[in-house]
Structure formats: structure tokens, C-alpha cells
Amino acid sequence: MKNVSVIGSGFAGMSAACFLADAGLSVTVHEKNATNGGRARSFSEAGFTFDMGPSWYWMPDVFERFFENFGKNPGDFYELVQLDPGFQMLFSKDDILPIPASIEGIYEVFEEIEKGSADKLKKFLSEGKYKYDVGMQELVYKPSYSWFEFATGSLVKGVVKLDVFQSVSSHVRTYFKDERLVALMEFPVLFLGAMAKQIPALYSLMNYAALSLGTWYPKGGMMKIGEGMETLARSLGVAFRNNDDVKRIVVEDGKVVELDSGDRSDLVSGVVATGDYHHIEQALLQPKYRNYTESYWGKRTMAPSSLIFYLGVNKKVKKLIHHNLFFDTSLDVHAKEIYESPQWPTEPLFYVCCPSKTDSTVAPIGMENLFVLVPIAPGLDDTPILRERYYEIVMKRMEEICEDEISKHVVYKKSYCINDFKADYYAFRGNAYGLANTLRQTAVLKPSIRNKEVKNLFYAGQLTVPGPGVPPALISGQIAAEQMINYLKR
Ligand SMILES: Cc1cc2nc3c(=O)[nH]c(=O)nc-3n(C[C@H](O)[C@H](O)[C@H](O)COP(=O)(O)OP(=O)(O)OC[C@H]3O[C@@H](n4cnc5c(N)ncnc54)[C@H](O)[C@@H]3O)c2cc1C
């Protein structure tokens, strides 16, 4: 039996491993960390269980499609609940906008804020549905080796409707005037790692995902998805090797022959590398086998990094719901400080996830589990003093807007930032979400899923196609596995 090694046990790695094993290959996942899940790992301390990374479960159809490939469905591994409200945007202590789960409820919210906007939203979302359907069926599952892959009848006919050349920002502004509605409609593309001004309006499909398909939560936390995928992978025969930091990919005659982890090495028929692309190429491969140079990487637009605080609070916090977006300062200024002149933000927007509002298993009774995230430019200096300064800034604003005392009640606190992303995942410039989905970094223009010199080496994960986020990571693993399977059949 041919044996394939997968580097990394994040969503992309586990997805690839499942498809490879299902095709009859012998698969080993090599993971440098002690636990699996990559950026979506979790940890438990002082009675609290924290998801370390993703917290938004969007596009449930992608997860269903993933598990269906193996005759399963998400419900076999975790229980999903739809959040209602899906999330809320906090503009000030007196101006909080909860977004209901039902589409009728969302229309009412729009109409109340801006007369006539409910009808506009219907039209916007029907275009978004078209983009989502075409995107899911004809765009994202492609390896993106060449633009010819996209020259299908419906894509060519629909190219105008797909809105590739206008930005999400100008698209949104042709529909809505009220700045709160504009912020609400522009926020979903932040998941793609760039601002609405830089993202093609094709990605207004994210609004359809956010508002029409709903915001979901796997009971027990996002780590339940990874646990489910690991259970599935093991049932298909995948072996996991943790604390296994791959140091070198050994190539002979244009093919990977061996993976070297320092104290041991394995002979392999192929490798799917899902660790951060930059690290895999620059640290594990000889220069002649790299697809890209250091200067290529220096010119990429990376998605932001994050300063995160995992907090345990010994009381219930007023006004918070499961997902809370603090939009009480200027998004434009913060965005410039991320993308145009990278620096620590003067007045950052931030996000607070409070899963204990939905799930009694993630915090002791009567307490709250808070995950506070401040998006920041990758590559900034990261020091304990800076982290503490921002802790004080966001805590003060959270207390003011929630009209509640929180800091005195914090019984557990841990911070996580650029240096941790580098140490834990070898993240290029300490990025959190990989590479931004700007027009110049879409599809064929992304770092390629295949190594151009080494035939049995493929890449997957948030720095290659289709892009950052949990659903794209699942898809990326599938595409890379299919390419490997086709190669090994030849
Ligand atoms: C703070 C944060 C919040 C996020 N929020 C959301 C959200 O709400 N919703 C959403 O959809 N997405 C979200 N994302 C994005 C999403 O989590 C990621 O895009 C996705 O999990 C990436 O998966 P991956 O498999 O590509 O990479 P990773 O999860 O990084 O997995 C790669 C793995 O490779 C391992 N590795 C690297 N090098 C080596 C080596 N040499 N040897 C062995 N192992 C190696 C790493 O340790 C890691 O475990 C968030 C990300 C972060 C960081």
C-alpha cells in the first residue's frame, strides 16, 4: 500500500487525511503540537474550556458536504445549535444591534433603520445566493492551476453577475446608506482577511452565508469539529503522530522520498503539507524546490494577526450574547493601521465571544468564558507591556458599553499574540488567518496547491486555495488529496 504523509493536523490536514485514507492509502499525520486541530485547538484551565481560534460556524453546508463524502453527517460527531440572535454589533452603550436568526426578523431590523432597505436587502441577498451557489459548485473546489478551469458555460455567462471587478465596499454602498447597515454588511468579509474595499464583490456571497444560512454553534465548542474529524480519520485508518516537528522534506529525482523529523525519518510515496506554506517551503525544502522566494512572500497581503485574551469571569456579564462585535470606533482608521501603515491600533475595534451564554459546559455555573480578539497587523513587535496596554483599553470599553464591572471579576487570564502564532504554528509574520482573499490573491493568483518541481508534493490550508477560514480549510484539504490521489494513480 502506498503511504502518504500529511504535515499538520489542522482542518486542512485532517480533511486531506480522510480523503487519502478513504482512497485506500496508508496515511500518517505529523503534527508538531501535542494536540490536534491546529489553530482550532482548545485548552482547559480553572474550570473553563477555551476554543483557541475560530468561534464562528458559518456555511453549514460545507461541513455537511465534507462528512457526506464518508457516509456521515455532522450530527454523528457533534450537536449543532443555531444562535438567535446570530450576533450583535455594539456601536455604543445605547446603540446595540442584535441580528436575529430569521430572515424576516433581519428585514424588520433593516427597515427600522433605513426605510426601503428591506427590499434592497432581499435583492442583495438574492444576488449573494447566486454567487454562493456558483462559487460553491464551480469555483472553490478547483485546484486553480489555470484560468481555463473556470471557463465553464455558467461562469462565463455569469461573469458580470459574479461582480469580480467591483469591491464589496462599493457594492454595499450602492444599496445602503446608514453607516450601521454598511458596517454590518461589510463585516463578514473581514473573515477573508482584508477590508471590504480590497475584496471583490463576488465575496458578498459571505453576506448570504452570514444572514441567510445562519450562525451555528457546535455544543461543547468549535473543537468538537476537529474531534469529530479526528474520530472519522482514525476510523478510516489514519495514524496521528503528535510532537512530531517535521524538519526536512527530502527530494530525489523530482520526488519526495523521505520526511525527516530530526530523531526519525519516514520513507513516503507523497506528502500533503498543510503547515504554513511559507514555513514549509523556506524551512523544509532546498531552495531549488521552492515555488516561491522570500521576496514573493514579502509582497503578499497577509490576513491580520490577533491579540487574544482568554478570560474566566466569576459572574455573568450583562449585555453580552454569544458573538459581540464592538464597532464603537472607526473601522477605517483601524483598517489603515492593519493594512496601510502597520502599527498597533490607536482605537481598536474588537470582538468578544462569550460561549458560556449558550453552553454550560465551557465555564463553571454562574461564570462566563470570554474570548476577546483584537485584529492587528502581522509582523508587529509583540511584548508583554503592549499586550497589557491593550487589555486595559478593551476591558475599559467593554465595561463602559456593557455597563458592568468585569475586570475585578476576572479569575483566569491568558493572552495569545504574534509570538505565540510563530512559536505554535510557524506562522509567517505571526499571521492568524493566512493570506487575504484580495483580487490579486484569488484562485490562480494564490500560492499554488502543487509544487511545480516536486511531483508528489501538494500543499493545503489557509495560505493556498481557496483561502482562509474553517470551511475553505476543509475544501483545501479535499482538493490537495484529490490531486495526490490522481498523481499516485498515474
Ligand atoms: C484567532 C482565530 C480566529 C479565527 N476565527 C475563525 C472563525 O470564527 N471562523 C472561521 O471559519 N475561521 C476562523 N479562523 C480561521 C481558521 O481557524 C483557519 O483558517 C483554519 O483553522 C486553518 O486551518 P489549516 O489547517 O489551514 O491550518 P492550521 O490550523 O494552522 O494547521 C496547520 C498545522 O500544521 C502544523 N505544522 C506546521 N508546521 C509543521 C511541521 N513542520 N511539522 C509538523 N506540523 C507542523 C501546525 O502546528 C498546525 O497544527 C480563525 C483563526 C484564528 C487564528
Image: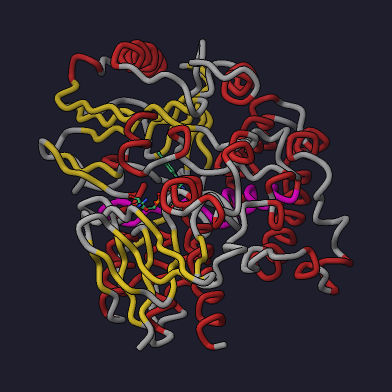
Residue 456 picture location, percent across and down: 51, 72
* Residue 245 falls inside the magenta stretch: no
Quadrant of the rendering where the C terminus is positioned: bottom right
Q: Is residue 188 visible?
A: no
Task: Examine the rendered structure and indicate whether residue 340 appears above or below residue 465.
Answer: above
Q: Residue at x 68, y 46 (%)?
A: 441
* Residue 212 falls inside the magenta stretch: yes
Camera-side residue of 151 and 255: 255
Camera-side residue of 265 and 228: 265
Task: Examine the rendered structure and indicate whether residue 113 appears above or below residue 44.
Answer: above
Q: Residue at x 33, y 81 (%)?
A: 26
24 sits left or right of 112 in the view: left
Q: Is residue 245 visible?
A: yes
Task: Examine the rendered structure and indicate whether residue 94 appears above or below residue 280.
Answer: above
Camera-side residue of 31 and 216: 31
Residue 269 picture location, percent across and down: 41, 77
Residue 286 picture location, percent across and down: 48, 53
Q: Residue at x 28, y 27 (%)?
A: 415
Q: Quadrant of residue 352?
A: top left
Quadrant of the rendering where the N terminus is positioned: bottom left
Number of labelled discs? 0
Q: Residue furthest left?
A: 46
169 sits left or right of 483 in the view: right
Camera-side residue of 406 and 77: 77
Residue 11 picture location, percent across and down: 40, 59
Identify the coloring. secondary structure
Q: Which portion, as a residue range, is magenta?
A: 202-222
39 sits left or right of 161 in the view: left
Q: Quadrant of residue 74?
A: bottom left
Task: Examine the rendered structure and indicate whether residue 202 appears above or below residue 158.
Answer: above
